[in-house]
Amino acid sequence: MLQPLSIARRPTATPWLPCLAALIIYFFGSTFAAAQQETRPLEAAASGQQKTEQLLQLAIQNRNTNPQKTLQFGALALESLETNPDSASRTLVLSNMAWAHMVLGQYEQGILLAEQAVSIAESLDDPDHLIVPLNISGLLYWRMAEFERALSNFFRALELTQTLKKTDSEAATLNNIGLIFIEQGDNARAFEYFRKAQKIHRASGNRGKLTIMLNNIAGIFSAQGDYSQALEIQLEALRIRESLQDKPGIAELQLNIGITYDHIGDYDKALDYFLEAQHLFESLGDKRAIAQTLNAIGLAHQHKLDFAKAQKHYEKALSYAREIKDESIECSVLMSLAQLKILQGQPRDAQTFLDQGFRLAKSLGFGALQSQGHLLQAEIHLQQNDPERAAKEAEIAADMADASSEKAKSSQAQLLLSQIHAARGDYRQAFSAFRHHKKLNDELFSKASSDKLAQLRSLHEAETRLRKIELLERDNAVQASRIEKQKVERNAWIFGLLLLLTISLLLYGRFSQKKVNLALQKSLNTQRELMQAIAHEFRAPLARVQLAVDMLQDQETRPDSALFGNINKGLKELDELLREISLWLRRESPESAEEISQLVNLQKLLQEQAALQHQLHPGKCISVTPAEAASQKVPLPRKYLLWTINNLLSNAMRYSHRQVEVSCRVQAESIDIFVDDDGPGIAPADRQRVFEPFVRLDPSRTRATGGTGLGLAIALRLVESFDGSITISESHLGGARFHLSWPTHQ
């Protein structure tokens, strides 16, 4: 049974599909199951049938990496079949030899062997053996640009795969048919066949073959200008290829992703992907792919206006293409060189390259490159001051782009037509063509996409050009400019006076605001001092009341314990409230002193405070997760840090159901402490309100649960005075997570 065959990578005329001509030949019959395993060395004593089988396995093993060996082993296998005839084996041997000739670029030799294999398979009256040679002969005809004959073989193979219900072979054939339609510029039909193949591969779970379909579909989105969708699909395919450690597939996708970034306008990002792809292709020795990558690198440098580097890479790519005699790559590079010469203002050199490229594009039947050629020809005529001929060529390019639904190329053609009409002085036609270009651009970028930079650039350029065309249509430009000059002079005086008035008002406002700020600060300081005095003075009579209650309780013969308990509890809460109000006022004061940092063992500090909280809440569990660097001593203001940690732990224990977890992390610039509880949690809308003084979020958080409502407010002010922060999020325990970040450098 044949191993799956990966298509020999044939560069296509479509730039988004540089190394994928994907045929996958699957498992036919059961007599060659050993071909999937590592090939055994030939045994001298092997029988004729065994020798043929082993030679066939060696041919399969080397068909992509060393096609010359495949041809050698295939010839030996044919000799063996002369003494031990087996038509099925002969079909497979001839098919693999045809494949090897295709990899070597020897298409005519390959087609002779492939057609011979088709004839033998037809004589067997076994449709199963006919699928492979039909697909290989279709690929060879495609390489020779005989698209109709290629489609005829592919459709015949498709019918057999559907009759035999061989879904993997059906998907491979669907893919090949889609690639032919791409070459012919029929993206809609190509998309239809790619989608069918993708559905089959998803159902079978074959991730490797699925990436081929994803890449082809991404190419169609790219041709239609939907670069965001194309990039999303290509990145998905790249992740799959990386998980499969498929170096050729990774290189292909890196090249295609680079091309997409080049379309978006992120040329540096594109070059990063191109260089990675080039490195992989060079390690694989794939000269076709190297040539295409060099062409893409040259295009990126051309877009960056680095013409010297662009020409250097184009020339290397052309050398590779001619060495391997691949006319499709040669055609693409010639078109790129023509474009470069146009940008350099050398229409004569551009015409030389374009004539060569145009001739190849027509002979190969590549619609996309022919459309590009007409655009380049229009630009050359425009540089040669021949707008009439330029307009005809641009209109042909626009019609071809519209027929193949290539909105990006159609937009480019309309923009060129706008420039041509403007050069002819026909501003009405120029305006009409430019509006058509702008409409196409709006359609290209109307989808929600991640390439916002490209969208903004396109819209900006469109608006700029639109204004230029509108200005050209005004016949009274001279008179208008004179009137405009007078207006500018008058407005300059008015603007100067307004500016002077505005500066005066700003200075006066700043002076007034400063006075207001000083008055407000004085008032706030007075209120703060008054509140501190009231709180301080209030504690003296409060202490006397407490003493009187204690004495009264001692004098009672049968004191009411519940009554006195409530009185003492209320007095205690009032005392705690006054103490925290005093602390709040001190933290709000700008004159608050800062404690000098001490070396603190954070892990030990947390464990000690957790133990104290457990004593206060023996019915609940609190744990401290040890951290790797927490046992080291860190310079921190111990008193304030201790107060803050104790407040957070107390809050968590108070509102938790059963469990509190404490963890920490020591970094170079700060420490991070996390307190998690399994309580009711805090809604996102309320997470800032808990830091406001006296705020309780729900009826359950009353003084019955303890606290005055100032603890978290004081903690936040304290932490912020040291440039730290406290944030709240959802805990993995189901309740709230408090994150304290405290800088270690003051």
Image: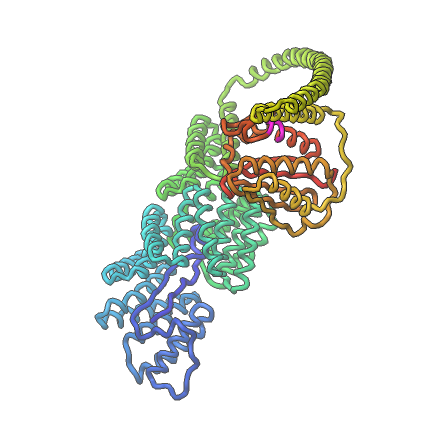
Residue nearest the observer in this picture, 701 or 563: 563
Total number of numbered discs in the rendering: 0
Task: Indicate the position of residue 309 as horizontal and vertical percent values.
Answer: 60, 50
Identify the residue shown where x is 49% and y is 35%. 680
Which image quarter is the N terminus in? bottom left
Residue nearest the observer in this picture, 724 or 397: 724
Residue 528 seen in this snapshot: no
Which image quarter is the C terminus in? top right
Magenta range is: 707-711
Residue extending furthest toward the bottom: 45
Q: Give the image's coloring scheme.
A: rainbow
Identify the residue shown where x is 76% and y is 34%. 595
Q: Is residue 322 left or right of residue 74?
A: right
Task: Indicate the position of residue 644 as horizontal and vertical percent values.
Answer: 66, 35
Q: Is residue 440 left or right of residue 114?
A: right
Task: Indicate the position of residue 345 as horizontal and vertical percent values.
Answer: 57, 42
Q: Is residue 111 above or below residue 22?
A: below
Residue nearest the observer in this picture, 135 or 321: 135
Q: Is residue 328 above or below residue 725?
A: below
Residue 685 seen in this snapshot: yes
Task: Indicate the position of residue 549 as horizontal and vertical percent values.
Answer: 65, 21
Residue extending furthest toward the front: 557
Q: Is residue 329 left or right of residue 365?
A: right
